[in-house]
Amino acid sequence: MYTIKRFEGRIAAVTGGAKGIGKGCCLRFAQEGARVAVLDLAMDEAAAVAAECEKLSSQPALALRCDVADPASVDAAFGAIVDAWGGVDVVVASAGIYSGQPLVEVPLKDWQRTLDIDLTGVFLTNKAVAPILMKQNRGGAIINISSMAGKTSWPASAQYSAAKSGVIGLTRSVAMELASCGVTVNAVCPGNTLTEMVQGVAQTIAGRDGVNPQDWLKLRAQDCPLKRFATTEEIAGVVTFLASPDAAYITGQAIEVDGGMVMS
């Protein structure tokens, strides 16, 4: 439990908050005293995360259905937060999927779905929260979850890499537009992080290439100089730093949290 309460009296909303990095961010914000809104399509899991947040923070939490690829759903979710709590201070756009196939085998529908969720979903989230932050005129922070795939790439990842690269460009543009309101906008680029999504990727590759999923995970852990996967808590630590007063002069950045992978 964190004894520093940087977010007491603050409101944090996290898309994709029911699992993985999004869940890690929800719990960390709650540990530091925030009211947390967990936005996701998996409502049972989102409700469980919200309940855990309430125990950690002794503050109310919300579980809200949100399809980040649907503008009406995104607007409704943020409208519900404003109706319940009067505003929002921090938004983490974490919802995402991974679909990896060799370029010549990528169906257009898979390409489009990945971009709809991983890029357009971030755009719609930023677009929905921007007028709220501007009207409040009390600063705030947006943190968009990109990936090391936004700065480098590997075979069979065209749609994912394209989407995550787009998130970095989007982040810089939004940072420029909201700077005059005192709102910081940054991207976090995680490296290999041990999440449910990565476990699913391991299973997919195991079926496609005839390898053992655990062997594939062990191999991927060697991709970076630190020779291990990140934890969701480690990614959440950087996200909460960027949302804190300590990062008030950092904006428009895409920060690698990848164990040195891009460097190497």
Image (tube, rainbow, N blue to C red):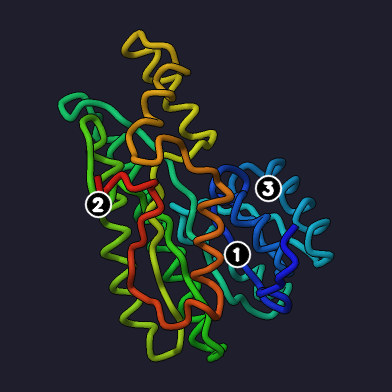
Calculate the distance from the C-alpha at mark 1 to the C-alpha at mark 2. Answer: 26 Å
**Above or below 91: residue 214:** above
Quadrant of the image containing the C terminus: top left
Could you say which disc has been placed on residue 13 in the image?
A: 1
**CB-based contact (under 8 Å), mark 3 and mark 1:** no
Observer-nearest residue: 60 or 131?
A: 60
Going by the image, does 100 lie left or right of 139?
Answer: left
Q: x and y percent of residue 91 in the render? A: 53, 67
Q: Amino acid at mark 1?
A: Ala
Point 45% across, 35% down: residue = 228
Task: Check the image and name the residue furthest to the left.
Answer: 104
Task: Check the image and name the residue furthest to the top.
Answer: 210
Q: x and y percent of residue 158 in the render? A: 22, 38
Quadrant of res 87: bottom right
Could you say which disc has been placed on residue 46 in the image?
A: 3
Graded by Cα atoms within 10 Å as few (under 14), some (14 to 19) or many (20 or more), the crowding at tag 3 reads many
Dot 2 or dot 3, earlier in sequence:
3
Q: Amino acid at mark 2?
A: Lys
Quadrant of res 138: bottom right
Q: x and y percent of residue 263 in the render? A: 25, 50
Calculate the distance from the C-alpha at mark 3 to the C-alpha at mark 1. Answer: 12 Å
Observer-nearest residue: 129 or 248?
A: 248
Q: Which one is in front in this view, the residue at disc 1 or the one at disc 2?
A: 2
Quadrant of the image containing the N terminus: bottom right
Observer-nearest residue: 37 or 230?
A: 230
Calculate the distance from the C-alpha at mark 2 to the C-alpha at mark 3. Answer: 30 Å
Graded by Cα atoms within 10 Å as few (under 14), some (14 to 19) or many (20 or more), the crowding at tag 2 reads some
Residue that badge 2 annotates: 151
